Each structure stands twice: as C-alpha cells, then as structure tokens.
C-alpha cells in the first residue's frame, strides 16, 4: 500500500480513502499496524483541528436521535461532521450497545457527514486507542466537528474524555427530584449536561432536572479550564430538533474561550502524553504474550508455584529479561 498516496487522498477529504485508512488502523495484523503508524505520522503536520466532542449517555437517553439531529444541524451550517464511537460492549461480547450507522440513516446519507461504528477489539483499551487514531484521521481529512459517542458505563467515558476537547453528557428527564445516580466522576469530566426529551409531557420534568443539575454543577470544584457559567446544563429535544442552536453556541463559546486562554492546546498536549503512556503500557503487555518472553513467563510462573523463587524476585527477573530483548 502506498502511504503517500493514501495520505494525500485523505487530506483531500476522500471518504473512501478515509474509510480504508480506518480499516487499516483497526487491523490486528502487525504489518498493517506498521503501515497505520506511518500513515498517522505522515498526517501529523496538516495543521487541521476539528472540534472533538465526546458524547455520553445511558442506552435509551436519545444519543442516536441527538447525534443524527444535531449532526444534520451542523452540516446544515456548512460544517463537515464525523461520528465515531467507543462501544465497551464490542470489547466484552463482540456485540454492540451502540448499534451501527443504520441508526442514523438521514445523517449517513448526508455528503457532509461520515459515520463509522465502534471498532471491535478484544479490550476496551484497544477500542479506545483505535478510535483515538480514527479521530486524527478525520481531523486530517478536514472534518470540522468529530463527535465521539459512548455509553455511560464509567471507564469508556473517561477514555472518550481523554480524546475530546469537550465532553457532553446526555441525560433524560428524571421522575423524582433525585439526581439520576450519575457518578461524581462523570459529573467532573462533563463540560455540558444536556437534558434531552424536553418536549411534550416530559418538558416540565426536563426543565426541573436541568435546574437540579445546574445546581449540582455549581457545587463542584471550580476548574481552571472553565469560563464563567461552565460546566453548563441545558435542555434539548433531539426528537423535535429543539435547542441545538443554543447548545452549539455554548460549545463554540467554551472552545473559543479555551483556545484564547491556552487551555485548548494544553489539554491536547496532556492528552498526547496520556495516549503515549497507554501505547507504551500496551506494547509492554503485548510483549509478555510473545515468543521468548512468553516462555520465560511460563518458566518463572512454575518456579514461583513450586516455591523455588520469591514472587518479587521472579517478577524483577522477568522485567529485566524484557529490558534485554
Ligand atoms: P440511545 O440508545 O441513547 O441511542 O437512544 P435513541 O436515540 O435510540 O432513543 C431512544 C428512544 O428515545 C427512542 O424511542 C427515541 O425516539 C426516544 N427519543 C430520543 N430523543 C427524544 C426526544 O428528544 N424526545 C422524546 N420524547 N423522545 C426521544
């Protein structure tokens, strides 16, 4: 495969080239991985920056409805929108909570939109690492907004937040006056909370829920990367396509402020450090599974099982072996 050619086509915004490159980064074949890494390196210097928006919510809250409607709203503004996903169920069961592009039929037909379902990998870390690379590809291809969707199950949200400039939590109107068991950690990474389904009979409950969350957000520790009024809670109706404009306006206002105040670049630099660490850790773990290291692991495991060597000492020996390889 000619990397230079593929890279050139991606930069021109060729969607088939983009799709092909994403398939390449998702491949487990070592030669594909090598090509993918070179490709990503060759695209580093495009200077293009999309707004990367992480979006999370529990199943049924209206993520696909929101992404389709909001995506159409953005393409209607002349923007190019890519939709990617980190689906933790694809790692656990090979199944999918997030479904695929058939969910967003209108958006998938929009020439300004590009939708790609979650990669399936054996571990959540793998799903996230590959999605992060797909984000860079979409950015190099000239997309203005990259939406990265995930479901509300903890770890996957943290990973999506680590590849997004802005993290949006989608919630449904609550029945009672109780916050919906949203973990504090998730509240802390949210830049915006959107209470969806603010329509019909649910509207009043949505407005109340929104006020509750606005209150809860005010109680959280103030973060330096937030201008006045953020993190923010707002209501939307994905179904009626209501509230998109104010939500988009706030996303832009927040991003502009962070850019002007250095937080945007600082965050991306911090994320680059994070993913570098993840890649190194993963590569080291993968090394344990291969060739000589694997045999040595098995040998030392037997030795500790037989009580022939202390666990700590055996572990140190193993790590030294890896260092020599
Ligand atoms: P996901 O599982 O988070 O992707 O949720 P879906 O987008 O599939 O939506 C789940 C259900 O909620 C569907 O029946 C949608 O029609 C409904 N829904 C989504 N958004 C809204 C909304 O804004 N208002 C109302 N009333 N229903 C909605």
Image: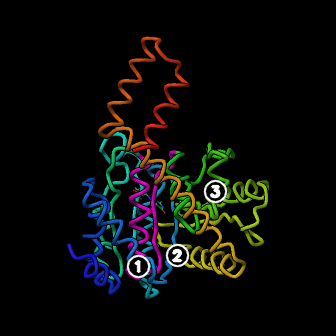
Q: Is label 2 in a helix, a strand or a loop? A: strand
Query: Which residue carries the number 2 mark?
Result: 51
**Residue in front for this viewpoint, 201 or 122:** 122
Tags 2 and 1 touching, CB below 8 Å: no
Residue 126 x/y as whole percent: 39, 51
Q: Is label 3 in a helix, a strand or a loop? A: helix
Quadrant in the picture for the N terminus: bottom left
Rendered-image quarter of ligand 1 = bottom left
Residue count near mark 3 (Cα–Cα under 10 Å), binned few <14, some 14–19, many ≥20: some
Instruction: Give how far apart the Cα atoms at labels 3 and 2 are.
Output: 17 Å
Query: Which residue carries the number 3 mark?
Result: 189
Query: Which residue carries the number 1 mark?
Result: 140
- Residue 122 placement: quadrant: top left
- Residue 225 placement: quadrant: bottom right
Q: Is label 1 in a helix, a strand or a loop? A: helix
Residue beneath the point at 41% across and 82% down: 142
Q: Earlier in the sequence, mark 2 or mark 1?
A: 2
Residue 78 x/y as whole percent: 43, 88
Tell me: residue 161, above or below residue 139.
above
Residue segment shown in magenta: 124-153
Mark 2 vs mark 1, foreground winner is: 1
**Residue in front for this viewpoint, 147 or 316:** 316
Residue beneath the point at 68% across and 75% down: 258
Q: Residue 132 magenta-drawn?
A: yes
């Amino acid at each position: 495969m000619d990397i230079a050619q593929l890279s050139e086509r991606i930069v021109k915004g060729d969607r088939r080239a983009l799709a092909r490159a994403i398939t390449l980064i998702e491949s487990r074949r070592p030669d594909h991985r090598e090509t993918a890494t070179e490709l990503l390196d060759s695209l580093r210097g495009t200077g293009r920056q999309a707004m990367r928006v992480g979006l999370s919510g529990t199943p049924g809250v209206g993520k696909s409805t929101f992404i389709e409607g909001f995506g159409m709203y953005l393409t209607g503004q002349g923007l190019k929108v890519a939709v990617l996903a980190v689906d933790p169920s694809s790692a656990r069961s090979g199944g999918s909570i997030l479904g695929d592009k058939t969910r967003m039929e209108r958006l998938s037909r929009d020439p300004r939109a590009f939708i790609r379902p979650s990669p399936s990998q054996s571990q959540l870390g793998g799903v996230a690492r590959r999605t992060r690379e797909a984000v860079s590809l979409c950015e190099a291809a000239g997309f203005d907004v990259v939406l990265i969707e995930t479901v509300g199950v903890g770890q996957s949200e943290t990973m999506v937040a680590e590849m997004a400039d802005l993290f949006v939590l989608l919630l449904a109107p609550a029945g009672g006056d109780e916050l919906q068991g949203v973990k504090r950690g998730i509240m802390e990474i949210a830049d915006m909370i959107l209470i969806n389904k603010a329509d019909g009979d649910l509207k009043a409950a949505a407005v109340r829920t929104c006020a509750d969350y606005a209150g809860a957000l005010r109680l959280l520790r103030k973060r330096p990367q937030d201008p006045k009024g953020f993190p923010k809670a707002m209501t939307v109706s994905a179904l009626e396509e209501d509230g998109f404009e104010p939500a988009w306006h706030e996303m832009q206002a927040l991003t502009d402020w962070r850019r002007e105040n250095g937080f945007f670049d600082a965050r991306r630099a911090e994320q680059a450090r994070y993913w570098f660490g993840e890649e190194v850790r993963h590569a080291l773990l993968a090394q344990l599974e291969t060739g000589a290291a694997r045999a040595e692991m098995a040998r030392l495991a037997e030795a500790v099982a037989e009580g022939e060597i202390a666990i700590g000492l055996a572990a140190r020996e193993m790590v030294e072996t890896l260092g020599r390889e």
